[in-house]
Image (cartoon, grey):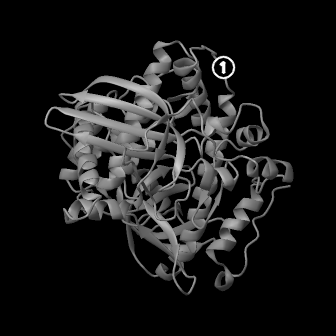
Amino acid sequence: MKRKRQRKKIKEVTLSDIVENEIKFNGLRQGFSKALNKHSKNLKYKNSTQHSDLTNIPFVTIDGEDSKDFDDAVWSECNKKKTKIMIAIADVSFYVEKGDLIDIEAKKRGNSFYFPNKVIPMLPEELSNNLCSLVPQKKRKSVVLEIDLEDEKIKKFKFYRAVIKSIARLTYQEAENIFLEKNKNNKLFPIILNLFNTFKVLQENSKKRNKISFDPDEYVVQTNNKKEINLIKKKKLESYKLIEEFMVLANTIVGHYLKINNIKSVFRNHEKPPNEKTKILKEIISEYNLNHSGSFNSQHDFNKIIEILKENKISFLNDMLLKSQSRAFYGTENKGHFGLSLDYYVHFTSPIRRYSDLVVHRDLIDCYFLKKKNSRIEFTDHLNNQEKKADSIERMIFDVASSYHLNKFRNYEFNGFIDSVESFGVFIKAINFPFSGLARYSRTFDSKYEEKNKHKYKLGQIVKFKIKRINNRNGKILLFKVKKLGNDAQK
């Protein structure tokens, strides 16, 4: 028998209610056993001959406002031709040994689960928010990657197991402000300036290798003082892209090192879009009479059409490009990363919140420091399933929360585009609003367009529509009064 999600009446439902309902519905593991909590509390910071002293390097962490588990810290020095980069990642494997109580539980969870107002961590909070977290002004064990760039190319790199001491915990907005204000009296300004200058070098390298630059709009769910649910568009901060570039660099170098040493670790793979999806893309693009003859078999083809969509002010169709992509996955064989345009890739930079990264750390330490080649084949199917589960729950919470927010827009006429065509109707994705809904044939279309004309509705076509019904239990939305618009309507 299919379970039903239990909801309170619309006026009583809060964001916390929605989150807790989904956690319960999906049977997520919450809390930790007494034995495991006792084990984690007995773990203490201790000196180690395995770790060099790098506390003299002024590392900083840059994360979200609500973050408490600081996996990574960064530092760089950027000159005209030479750049030195140091990326420190929490040395979780020093405290979590393979097969111990914490490791067994972390393996089952696969990853942390992040919700709008709550986190279910992969590791006990004593580790995730304290002992392993690179909190400011505290000595913390880490695996450090030192990279030397010359003329924008990697000249050499080196790994350390080291003790570091972050000098500041910055949010993305704080780092951005320090860079923009250019206050030379701020002791952090020279550090942030070097990081941003290095970021520009890394960003240029990404462009040269044709990393696909989708840059979609993202929204977050928030509540106000009255506990009303609202959707807020995330700011597109350069500081966020900065950290992304630093982490991609680290993941690439570690992936390359493991591959050339024939280590069957947990690689992060992203394959080319399947032919059936690229065929649909070509049909959509042709409907807009855009000057693009690419086959979508290369990153260059995608970047070219992204620029064309931007020039024609129809960037909302980026959603169709994203939808065409294959899903990234974990595997023991390296297959490269199509979206990032990289031959080698792993997840190395978040061992506090992803088990895949913890495995990669162990493999790197075995190979680089201990000179052992333990080619472990981990159960990647479980990691993929747990990642999908996290994505699915986060999406459901967002959809349900969005449905409450949309109650105030019931009489609003939206612009959107047809995202999917089915035998029973079409799914329409709103433009400038983060939701989609179903418009059934004959019953919900404008009277001018009867069911006999349903074949005229095509993927990517721009339409106007209204909301007919909102199901606050599952976030599903039924649409009606659909009217076709010309494909230049948004220009």
Q: Quadrant of the C terminus?
A: bottom left
* Observer-nearest of 442 and 259: 259
Q: Position of residue 474 (x, y in %)?
A: 65, 65
At 56% from the left and 14% from the top, the residue drawn is 371
Residue 115 in the image: state x and y as whole percent. 60, 61
Depth order, front residue of 126/218: 126
Residue located 27% across and 32% down the image? 210
> In x, y percent, where is residue 225?
53, 85
Give the amino acid at mark 1: Arg
Residue 15 or residue 323, whichever sits in front: 15
Quarter assignment of residue 94: top right
Work out whether residue 149 can be spotted.
yes
Residue 349 visible here: no
Q: Quadrant of the N terminus?
A: bottom right
Question: What residue does disc 1 label?
Answer: 376
Residue 383 place in picture, x, y as percent: 65, 36
* Residue at 74% over, 40% down: 108
Residue at the image point whose x is 65% and y is 50% from the top: 127
Mark 1, secondary structure of its residue:
loop
Graded by Cα atoms within 10 Å as few (under 14), some (14 to 19) or many (20 or more), the crowding at tag 1 reads: some
